[in-house]
């Protein structure tokens, strides 16, 4: 594998909340430095939907010596607005690329959205993410001819928007272009330079996971896994990319929707099982999802409200406290932090990484 990375959330503003309320530039700089030096990563996927935050974090990532995968994350945007929206981020990515310290320095890759058939409006029926997710996973959507025809029309619109967004981005951005696809999405990879997929192994695909990853090489382009990981409770690995959905947000304050056994080793096992598969199947770049779940505080004395159980983060965000290992932060490394640092560090020491 050429490059080992971590996802980094700058904040996704949603209708009713944000995934990161506070954004302190000094802390951002420090965290990206930790990703580079302590986790031994050489790439970071910086994502969010607040433009100033994204470009600020992107600049600090490059300063830290990390390849920057700049990843705007539009949510509930109408399909027709996507090309113009993403073009603005393409211009930002080009500015970051042009101001690198050296031409042979860290690379800037532009990630043109994430799982847009689900996160944006106009492809799958539904005004909200939850409604679209329900439509996409409802067997009746495929059994009922009228509903299936609507899905088909959405997929055709999806292919048109792919061409439009890629064309708009290439008009202003001179670096490599990719898109973070869901495993269910059909993407015209001829439009992009890298085949990138959010690849979550779970109980439904574990038997065919390696074969699926292998199949992404048929496009003759580098393959990246823009997300892989699991949440922090016993059994989360079997739920893969849906393991986060254990928080009841219909109550105030939000709480876990059932009793879950917090298990940091679940993440460690997942990392040690899945990363070798990605390596064996020739994946070029991987990103653990993610560094921190900033809106999901760890409350060890209150298990029902220990939202870090649902987090994929390598660190546990503390509720009103400061860290012990890193006193300048408000989080504490989890077991997966040290496991990932060991694995990434070992590859760096043996020259497996590009830098």
Image: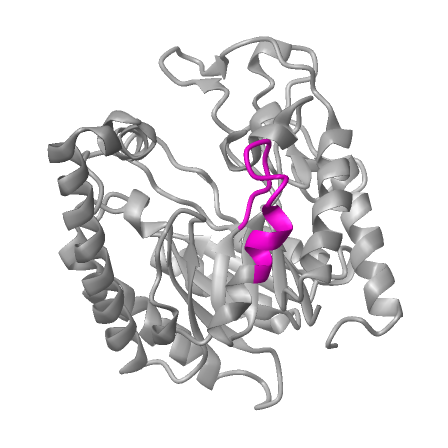
Residue range in magenta is 199-214
Instruction: Please provide percent x and percent y for residue 39.
Output: 75, 55
Q: Nearer the viewer, residue 312 or 318?
A: 312
Q: Is residue 99 above or below residue 86?
A: below
Considering every residue shown, the one lying at the far left of the view is 146
How would you classify the magenta stretch by its main secondary structure?
A: loop
Please give left or right for residue 59 compared with residue 238 in the image: left
Instruction: Please provide percent x and percent y for residue 73.
Output: 37, 52
The quarter of the rendered structure image containing the C terminus is bottom right
Q: Is residue 96 visible?
A: yes
Q: Is residue 290 visible?
A: no
Q: Is residue 275 above or below residue 194?
A: above
Q: Nearer the viewer, residue 288 or 219?
A: 219
Which residue is rendered at x = 64% and y = 32% of the image? Answer: 237
Please give left or right for residue 81 compared with residue 288 in the image: left
Residue 200 is a magenta residue: yes
The quarter of the rendered structure image containing the N terminus is bottom right
Residue 284 is a magenta residue: no
Displayed quadrant of residue 187? bottom left
Number of dots carrying numbers: 0
Instruction: Please provide percent x and percent y for residue 52.
Output: 38, 60
Q: Is residue 51 above or below residue 118?
A: below
């Amino acid at each position: 594998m050429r490059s080992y990375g971590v996802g980094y959330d700058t904040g996704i503003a949603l209708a009713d909340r944000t995934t990161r309320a506070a954004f302190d530039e000094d802390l951002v700089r420090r965290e990206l430095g930790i990703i580079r030096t302590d986790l031994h990563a050489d790439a970071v996927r910086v994502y969010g939907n607040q433009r100033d935050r994204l470009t600020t974090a992107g600049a600090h990532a490059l300063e830290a010596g990390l390849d920057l995968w700049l990843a705007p994350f539009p949510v509930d945007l109408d399909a027709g607005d996507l090309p113009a929206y993403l073009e603005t981020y393409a211009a930002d990515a080009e500015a970051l690329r042009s101001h690198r310290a050296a031409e042979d320095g860290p690379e800037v890759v532009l990630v043109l959205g994430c799982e847009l058939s689900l996160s944006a409006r106009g492809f799958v029926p539904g005004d909200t993410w939850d409604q679209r997710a329900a439509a996409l996973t409802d067997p009746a959507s495929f059994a009922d001819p009228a509903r299936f025809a609507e899905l088909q029309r959405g997929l055709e619109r999806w292919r048109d928007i792919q061409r439009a967004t890629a064309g708009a981005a290439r008009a202003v951005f001179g670096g490599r272009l990719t898109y973070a696809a869901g495993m269910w999405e059909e993407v015209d990879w001829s439009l992009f330079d890298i085949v990138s997929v959010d690849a979550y192994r779970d109980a439904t695909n574990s038997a065919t996971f390696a074969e699926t990853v292998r199949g992404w090489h048929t496009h003759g382009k580098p393959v990246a896994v823009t997300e892989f990981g699991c949440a922090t409770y016993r059994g989360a690995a079997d739920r893969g990319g849906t393991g986060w959905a254990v928080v009841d947000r219909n109550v105030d304050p939000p709480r876990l929707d059932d009793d879950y056994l917090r298990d940091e080793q679940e993440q460690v096992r997942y990392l040690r099982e899945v990363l070798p598969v990605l390596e064996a199947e020739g994946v070029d770049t991987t990103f653990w999802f993610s560094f921190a779940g900033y809106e999901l505080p760890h409350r060890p004395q209150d298990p029902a409200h220990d939202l870090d159980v649902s987090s994929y983060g390598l660190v546990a965000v503390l509720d009103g406290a400061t860290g012990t290992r890193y006193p300048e932060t408000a989080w504490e490394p989890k077991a997966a932090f040290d496991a990932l640092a060991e694995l990434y560090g070992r590859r760096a020491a043996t020259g497996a990484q590009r830098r």
